[in-house]
Image (cartoon, grey):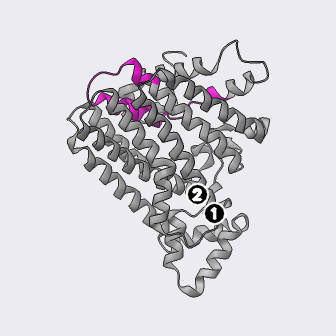
Amino acid sequence: MNATENMPWQDIPSFRLVDADLRQVAELIHRSLSGPEWSEEIAPLLEHFIARSGKMIRPALVLLAGRCFGPIGKKHVDVSAMMQMVHDATLLHDDVVDDGLTRRGAPTVNSLWGNESAVLLGDFVLSRVFHMTVDLDPALARVVAETAVRVCEGELRQVAQRRNWELTESEYISIITDKSAAFFSGCCRIGALLSHASDEQTDALAKYGLNAGIAFQIEDDLLDITGDELETGKTAQRDVTKSKPTLATIHLLGAVGASERAGVHALLDDPSRSRDALRRMFDLHGSLEYACAQARHYVDRAIKALVAVPEGDGKDALIATAHFMADRKA
């Protein structure tokens, strides 16, 4: 990797503090998934996979959490790479589940090589992560494993709730906590543990990650409705097309009168023919604004959780990162 090459995470100002470390993470992922030992059949898939690093939010959280308590070491980089690889593996599976055609501005693996190859590639990447955890302290390996399990649980719960237009806001928050926020929390926790933070400080960072992660997922669901595919870099309106309840849809169903609810259900059940009508309904009832406000609420909670963390550039970067979670364009 060229040391002067612009990378996607540099669009997030707070990540520039750990830019050099993130480059090491990207290089480690590249080394872990490339090499002469892989057959010529699998090599093109791996090359396509590792060429798109994304914004590296999860490894950045590991690094910034560690930076709050001292310098970044090799273990921070190793664990950051593992967390990113777990995330990327879940995205390969997500694209199959959601029929995604683009990811990070490029064709998805499933659109190029088929669903079977995408699923198996995701499994392959996860197996590489588990191989890497052999060298970790058991307590740290446990965090990595528990994070992966909880993400999968959240994804399963979300699939099970498709077309459940009776889903409550608290149930939605519970699902995205498993699906996304627990991952952010695990990244922050493990970064603090690697830097020998106190129990109080480690718990504070885990709480920060949980709330920031909830804000991130609420905003991600909003971008699925409002985002420009050229800016987000992935197939638009997949949640709507797959009939996944989101905070905006839950709010809309609570805002309309009983006589209108059946009509909204019909729009939600046939989204491919009703996207414009749904957007008008969201706008009319302030559902998008409500979801935005809730995302900012969780950002505030995340920042308040950092009270036990010492002042410094690491903490400042985490605060700026929390604000980014609820103010994204991609």
> Secondary structure beneath disc 2?
helix
Q: Is residue 138 left or right of residue 33?
A: left
Q: What's the residue at 30%, 21% (across, down)?
A: 71
39 in relation to 200, above or below:
above
Instruction: Tell me which amino acid carries mark 1.
Output: Arg
Specify whether 6 is left or right of 140: right
Q: Position of residue 94 (x, y in %)?
A: 64, 46
**x and y, in percent, of residue 75 in the image:** 40, 21
Residues at marks 1 and 2 touching, judged by CB atoms closer than 8 Å? yes
Residue flagged by tag 2: what amino acid is it? Gln
**Can you identify the residue that label 1 sits on?**
162
Which residues lie in the magenta part? 49-78
Does residue 13 sit above or below 1 in this rendering? below
Q: Is residue 248 magenta?
A: no
The image quarter in which residue 124 lies:
top right
On whether residue 77 falls in the magenta region, the answer is yes
Above or below, 327 relative to 48: below
**Dividing the picture into quarters, in which one does residue 62 lie?**
top left
Q: What secondary structure prevails in the magenta region?
A: helix
Residue sticking out furthest to the bottom: 259
Q: Secondary structure at mark 1?
A: loop
Side of 53 relative to 73 (left or right): right
Give the label on residue 158, or none: 2
Quadrant of the drawing holding the N terminus: top right
**Residue at 65% from the left image edge and 55% from the top image edge:** 238
Q: Residue at x 48, y 23 (%)?
A: 25
Tally of marks: 2
Residue found at the very far top of the displayed protein:
36
Depth order, front residue of 124/269: 124
Vertical placement of 100 versus 77: above or below?
below
- Whether residue 122 can be seen here: yes
